[in-house]
Amino acid sequence: MSCPYYTLPASSFWRQAVAERGVQDLDPHLAPTLRFTPATRIGSAGSCFAQHISRALQSRGYNYFVTERAPGFLTPEQEERYSFGVFSARYGNIYTTLQLLQLIRRAFGDFVPADQFWTDNNGRVFDLLRPRIAPRGFVSMTEAVADTSQHLKAVRKLIETTDVFIFTLGLTECWVSQADNTAYPTCPGCGSAGEYDPSRYEFRNLSVAETAGYLSEAIDLMSTANPKIQIILTVSPVPLAATMEPRHVLQATTYSKSVLRVAAEEMVRRYANVHYFASYEIITGAKGAGLYIGEDGRTITPHGVARAMDVFFAHFIDESSDQTAEVTNLAAAPKVAPPASAEPRIVCDEDDFYRALAASQPQ
Amino acid sequence: MDTQVETVLPVYIVGDSHSLPYHNLVFRERWTGAWVMARTKYIPGLTAHDFFNPATGEFHPEFIGFLEYEGLVRAGRATHLSMDEVDFAIAKAAAQSVLPPLILIAVGEIDVRGPIMRILKDTHDFVPPFPTTLPLLDKSLVPWDVIEEAIEERLGPFIAGLQQLIAAGFKRVYVQSVVPPTRKEERIRELQAYDCPVTVRTKLVQAFNWKMAAKCRSINLTMLDNWSDLTDGGLLRPEFDFDGVHLPPRGARVYLEALIDDAIDSRGLVANHPRYELYYRAACGLDPFQVTAPGAV
């Protein structure tokens, strides 16, 4: 009997698939199991890195599905300031699978956080689950509650009607409410909205079982609400800005990304409508790391983003689609050039949080 | 036949088409029975935003033209404060009051109905920072801060202009609030080529007035706001809906009476020491315009 490895394709062997390939040719995917066309509705959520995908989809003319749209006549600066169009709805960054699950449960009326709003000394109200959505806070609790209600309707509409939902897993570390386990995107009161109170908030670092469990529940809910939904999972290649664990941030990052990668893998194996896009492997793979990661070891370079997006489109575009013109043109178009200095800012709660934290740190 | 010559108290009303209902309005004010007469200037398309240019320090040319025509400004100065012989002679000949003139400015409706309302159209609503009886519709929300920013952008030049007027000595300036909008949705569709529900439009006007009133207060001016007289259930009373945009003359009179009431109650604003001094010298048999040498007795 011949060895089973003899039957495997080149992609299974490091030498042919990696070692003998240039960085720009390296595509860590096999044949696609999902294709989309310009008409496909594509929604997204996730960590900071997820914004590269949403922007690339929009800039290439794909149907980036936004259910919480900016009102007319806002300037691009205003749209960014109020987080319109950053994601499909104004949920801000969703770093953990627990956050995603709770968002979906809230959208379907199944969860009401006990500790969501915080009022500052000027009477402005902040949504701790979306701390950047209203930069100065809401003018009143009435506005905060009304805005949240409309936001959750938009999330529900997104889940119920999108064709594809891309979720970028970002972190396992999170802060939760001791009252009801509500997961916040950042630690309340640490350089951002809210007041840190150890009797109300606690740190948690989700395990593989927890991360996969929450993600599985979220996928079940989405698939029940929208049986046709296709889900693409990615893992953000951006390391942790800081860890609350009593260990080196590099170890904490390795743990976190490993857990997220395993959780994503488990979902792909478990669900036929879940797919994986290897942005993490593209960026952090040994061959690309030097080119795709900045000197700080954390920032993804424009080359890295461009390469990841090129692979994303090469992998998921249905070039045989009848909606030909646009697709053909897009496919024939030059690869994404590394953006110059005019690259739009990535809205990142985590980075802003740590910047503010550093600025306010006692000397 | 005996004829009695009476003078009237002029109120100078200038603005967009909302100055038109005041045109030729004459009535006896209810406190002294004196005649009040509206002297109006309609400046087509005048907005709060275009009233004054803070960058150049220039008012809308037609506004200045009106003040000059009425003799309120000459050679770039307020004539009621002038100690110039010619200005004094003109004031006496024209029987102009010693007091600073009463001026009412009506702008803002075009700002609300145009650049601000288009943010909302019929797709969005918003939550204002003040209590309102108007409902919040089941629509996407525009953050209040966005609405406020839009209002500030339109009001900024106007308020800067008002400050300039005060600095020039026009202390009895009033601002007319934007009138409640029509209930007729089809009229808005006709005017703007899009829909915007009456509750949203009305709330937007309230918000604009709310900001404008606060800004007027901050510079010691009064914004005339007769909202409760003109509305019922929070919306414009049908009898005050003249043509889907403007008030009828009786609505204008409501504002004008409020202005007179306030002017009577605000005597602190009327002192005009330069002119008192001229009259005093004249009463003493002195040439009011003869320059007295310093130290002379």
Image (cartoon, rainbow, N blue to C red):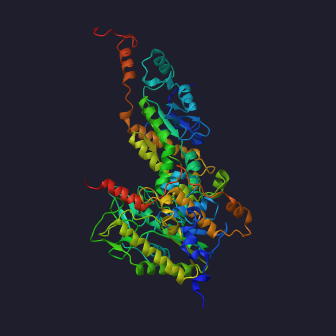
Name the one closer to the observer, A7 or A336: A7
Tell me, yes or no, if residue B230 can be seen here: no
**Drawn side of residue B24 relative to residue B276, left or right:** right
Furthest toward the left, the residue is A363
Q: Is residue A15 left or right of residue A253?
A: right
Q: Which residue is at the front of the view, B24 or B164? A: B164
Would residue B129 be found to the left or right of residue A29 on screen? left
Where's residue B193, x and y in %? 67, 53
Q: Can residue A76 be seen in this snapshot?
A: yes
Spot occupied by residue A206 in the image (x, y as percentages of width and height): 38, 76
Residue at the extreme front of the image, as rendered:
A1
The structure residue drawn at horizontal position 55% and vertical position 36%, both measured from the top left corner, is B14
Q: Is residue A275 above or below residue A313?
A: below
Please identify the quadrant where the N terminus of chain A is shown: bottom right
Viewer-proximal residue among A21 and B232: A21
Q: Position of residue A297 (x, y in %)?
A: 42, 59
Quarter of the rendering containing residue A67: bottom right
Residue B226 sits above or below residue A162 on the image: above
* Residue A261 drawn at (x, y percent): 47, 74
The mark tally for this picture is 0
Vertical position of residue B56 compared to residue A137: above or below: above
